[in-house]
Image (cartoon, helix red, strand yellow):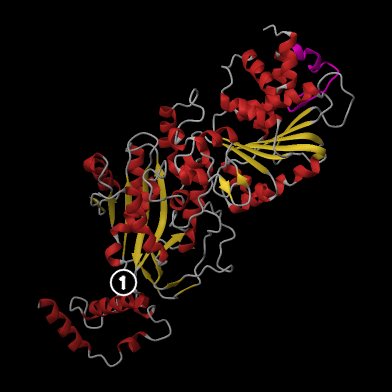
Amino acid sequence: MNWSTEQIARAKEDFRVFLFIVWKEINLPNPTPIQYDIAKTLQNPPSDRLILEGFRGVAKSFIACAYCVWLLWRNPVLKVLIVSASKDRADANANFIRRIFMTLPFLEHLRPDKNSRNTQNYFDVAGIVPDISPSIKSAGITGQITGTRADYLLADDVEVPNNSGTQMQRDKLNEAVKEFDAILKPGGQIVYLGTPQNEMSLYNELQKRGYACIIYPIIYPEDAKSRQDYIHDIYGDRLAPIIAEKYDRNPEAYAGYPTDPSRFPEEEIDSRRLSYGKAGFALQFLLNTNLSDTEKYPLKVADLIVTSLDNNESSLVWSWANGHAQRHQDLPCVALKGDYFYAPLGRSEDTVKYTTGIMYIDPSGRGSDETAYVVLKFLNGYLFLLEAGGYKEGYSDPVLRNLATKAKFYNVNKIVVEPNFGNGMFAQLLRPVVQEVYPYCAVEDAKSATAQKEARIIDTLEPVMMRHKLIVNKQVIIDDYKTYEKDPKYSLVYQMTRLSRDKGALAHDDRIDALAGGVGYFLDVLSMGEETGIEELQAEQLEKWLDPDYGVLYVEPDPDKIKQLHPNRKVAEDFKGVNALNSYYFRRNNHRN
């Protein structure tokens, strides 16, 4: 296009005009009011340390790249550094900047020439004095940026799920970005563009270091409480003024209305809300990390006991503690801030075989949901989670066979299937496969659930976890973190720690639902106390010893089983003073009555 001298002059003074020209030249629709306001904020930042949070899809990266071009057009000697979580993402930004220079006719004099540095991740604009630092340089957050100098540092999406999921990763990221101040020239600016990935976002930490923050959510606040979420006691009102002023002037008219309706109408927003779930939508599109209410997310991994478990037997008594000595330093933890995995304070030396074990399956069809499963075993009032996982292939033959094979491997007594999918169809499909692979294992449907799913899951798991009755195999946590790295929404720990009572709180809840179903299966026996359990095991063993089919005081192939109940005493001493025959006839007569 041919732009008039007046238009070019206006574009050089006002970045919003320049943005309009860029959008036209690369065949994009006209910028929206929100995009214009982001441009205005970049040109007139409230601080030289700025965090600009925008919902996914608002084009904040495109706008910022155009702004870097505008800066160099006005002052070609400036040095711009672009840092992203990955080198590929940073390089893509640098290439887009180069494309703008090559596209706009009135920037021809700045295009890199044959005498200029011009590579994939850095280049010089034409006509500048040679310098160690290039005009534009891109790098990943873990790349080589030490020694670089910059007048303008653009940190574009340096926080992503893969580098901020655990506290260790967040600490490492926090340290990495401290290098930015050493890179910046006097009088320079650092601008972060991003979308918070978790409740302990880097962008929250940066505000503690004095960074200003402006937030552009996809909708206006839905009520007074959500409006208050953008106002911090220390950091002030962080909601973008263009949004805050309209809402505050007429809350009833704007409540929940799209902030960028031409690009994201209500139907599109509703679709994304369903796709991400309430917690994910709050982070990715409302930019709301104010999720610290412990009552809102009641399931804490700190209430679990995490240790290495045997598939066949376990200790009878366990002790829980959450001291520093018990904290698992080697396990990646994707729970909320301050919530960690803990090893047992102690466990009894007594070990016996599990009383029973099940595999619980929460089936799904073919789609984004998983067919999730857990393997749980029970002993003396404790539940032991040996494995948890899921398959996206629904009820395909490989899935059915894998489930049957796992049930056999763990020697479970029963496979219990959530019946709400297909009115029990999944169990019907699974039975013939189990009959072939593991013929002595029963397959049955669980009781149909009628309560709201989120409340039911919490009401089932919270009391069991708070009493520290759920003991988790370390390998479950290790395998679950691998799932988190691929897609956090499918992680059991992520689902557990982000579940609230709000309907639709999670985009995917298959694994936590399967765990709740399995735990619910054992609720009637979980009230058993440790001492009661030991006494019942002793009585059961004595009954076997006195059974006439065995012979009086017959010792079964595992003679240590009773001894393990009290390892410091001999077996005979457990029954000192007991008339074995009288006890035998007393029990038999009671059974007949």
Residue positioned 55% across, 44% down in the render: 230
> Element under label 1?
loop
Residue positioned 44% across, 31% down in the render: 269
Where does the N terminus fall, quadrant-wise? top right
Residue positioned 57% across, 39% down in the render: 239
Where does the C terminus fall, quadrant-wise? bottom left
Q: Is residue 31 left or right of residue 583?
A: right
**Could you tell me if residue 185 is visible in this image?**
yes
Residue numbers of the magenta segment: 106-124
Q: Is residue 196 left or right of residue 547?
A: right
Q: Is residue 276 magenta?
A: no
Residue 471 appears at what percent x and percent y? 43, 63
State the predominant SS element of the stretch in magenta: loop
View extreme (bottom): residue: 577
User: What's under tag 1, amino acid-wise?
Assistant: Met
Residue 398 appears at what percent x and percent y? 36, 39
Residue 84 appears at what percent x and percent y? 67, 36
Vertical placement of residue 19 versus 165, above or below: above
View extreme (right): residue: 129
Which residue is tagged 1? 528
View extreme (front): residue: 249
Q: Is residue 338 left or right of residue 255?
A: right
Q: Is residue 121 magenta?
A: yes
Vertical placement of residue 161 versus 307, above or below: above
Q: Is residue 141 left or right of residue 133?
A: left
The answer to which quarter of the image holds residue 180 is: top right
**Could you tell me if residue 412 is visible in this image?**
no
Residue 27 appears at what percent x and percent y? 60, 14
Viewer-closest of 506 and 488: 506
